[in-house]
Image: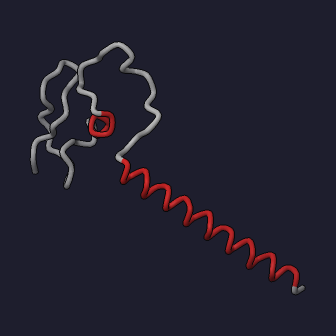
Amino acid sequence: MDQCQGRTKAGNRCKRSASAGFLYCSTHADQARTGRSGTKSPGADAPEILVGTPEERGALDTLIVAAALGAAVVVVFAFGKLLRL
């Protein structure tokens, strides 16, 4: 495995191994999402509105839509069974 590309709070490069298929270890995964280095800057503790890459957000949106459609199918099926009683 490759070395993590993340930076510590002191600004040094992380000595941990990157997670399989990623450039960062689990500790520094937030740096991959936000593009922040380990050094603190003014406003660094401000919450991020968008987290993840556009592809990850798109995949999550697709999953949410699929779950909502699945729930709607279950409700329609259950309602149909109820009406037949």
Say which quarter of the image contains residue 77: bottom right
Report the residue at 21% width, 49% height from top: 22
Q: Residue furthest bottom?
A: 84
Left or right for 1, reference 64: left
Report the residue at 40% width, 21% height from top: 45
Left or right for 44, reference 8: right
Vertical comparison of 3 with 8: above or below: below
Q: Nearer the viewer, residue 2 or 73?
A: 73
Vertical comparison of 3 with 56: above or below: above
Q: Residue furthest top?
A: 42
The total of numbered circles placed on residues is 0
Q: How is the image coloured?
A: secondary structure
Report the residue at 12% width, 29% height from top: 13
Quadrant of the rendering where the C terminus is positioned: bottom right
Q: Position of residue 19 (x, y in %)?
A: 21, 49
Report the residue at 42% width, 58% height from top: 59
Q: Nearer the viewer, residue 58 or 29?
A: 58
Q: Position of residue 24 (x, y in %)?
A: 21, 42
Left or right for 19, reference 2: right
Q: Position of residue 67 (x, y in %)?
A: 57, 64
Left or right for 81, reference 60: right
